[in-house]
Amino acid sequence: MNIIKLSRREYNQLKPYLVSEYITHTEADLYEMNYCGERKIVKTMFTYDKIFHQAKLNTLEELDSYKSYLPKSFCIPDNIIAVGRRKPAFTIPFFNGETLSSILKNPNIPIEEHIYYLVKVGEILEELGKTRRTTSLKDIYIGDLHESNIIVNIFTKQLGIVDLDSCRIGTRFSYTAKYLTPFSLVKTQPDKYEINQIIGNGPGYIVPDQNSDIYCYIVMILNYITGNIFKYFTVDDFYDYLNLLSNMGINQDLLYLIEKIATKDDNINPYKYLRNLTNKDIKTTKEAALTIIKKR
């Protein structure tokens, strides 16, 4: 992987990158720089934990080695920043756009376009699954998949998946993930979602795999169709909500695949069924979510 050598002064003078209010990046600071005529985002790494830092460097090297196998939508880190003997940061290509989080919360963007972007995320997961099936790269999972780690170019309608330094590739090291916590529905199926119990295997609660990636994707769908109040649902609310949607005529195949995240069965990507959702359906799903909350 290419190394960019900076002096301490050059590194300290990097310009902070101003991010959208919807972007969460508690793990690191972001800066920007110009390198060989290209705009780059610089992301710092915590270096005080040697095991964690080395795991990050290993992930970056693996991503670089297998980049030809990965979806074009992946914003793959392309340079490591070296300051003396330290390697405190890396760069990723600049991707112009807004987070999917801000897009999905924007009422001025048509529902059809919202659905289009959610479907595209599902297609990316399908492409990644094909990579695992047809290439030598058998162990690659996004891990921390959520709306703020996806950038949308509203002019080209292209998506960019960022924060890939927290993915699982060629290792069982587990990073923290927004939707994979002890307080989420994954707790209902400990045999299906592997809890990370090995000291030194990273700070993540769940070891990422295909089930956890699809779980995160379905949580994104639930966030959208509930009007972003799914986070307040209990396990009972989840089942009551799906039953209510079923009685209201929402696509049964979609509901069946959503329900799988809380069962022992492997998760199945539901992206194909999202295409059938209408403006009326989304209004119905949001009203149903409010009904579930109000009935408590």
Image (tube, rainbow, N blue to C red):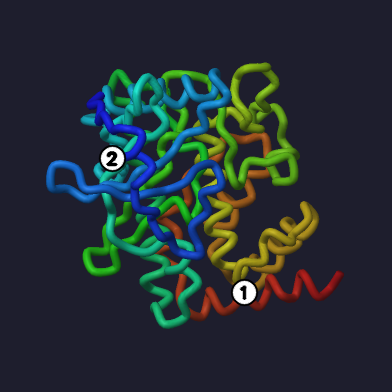
Residue bearing the label numbered 1? 286
Above or below, 123 relative to 11 = below
Q: Pick out the residue farthest to the right.
A: 296
- Residue 244 lies left or right of residue 227; in this view the side is right
Q: Earlier in the sequence, mark 1 or mark 2?
A: 2
| Helix, strand or loop status at disc 2 | loop
Residue 203 in percent (x, y) is at 63, 29
Q: Pick out the residue farthest to the left.
A: 37
Above or below, 266 relative to 150 = above
At label 1, counting other C-alpha atoms closer than 10 Å, the crowd grade (few under 14, some 14-19, many 20 or more) is some
Q: Split into 4 quadrants, where in the image is the C terminus?
A: bottom right
Residue bearing the label numbered 2? 71
Q: Pick out the residue farthest to the front.
A: 9
- Residue 194 lies left or right of residue 275; in this view the side is right
Kind of residue sitting beneath label 1: Lys
Camera-nearest residue between 256 and 5: 5
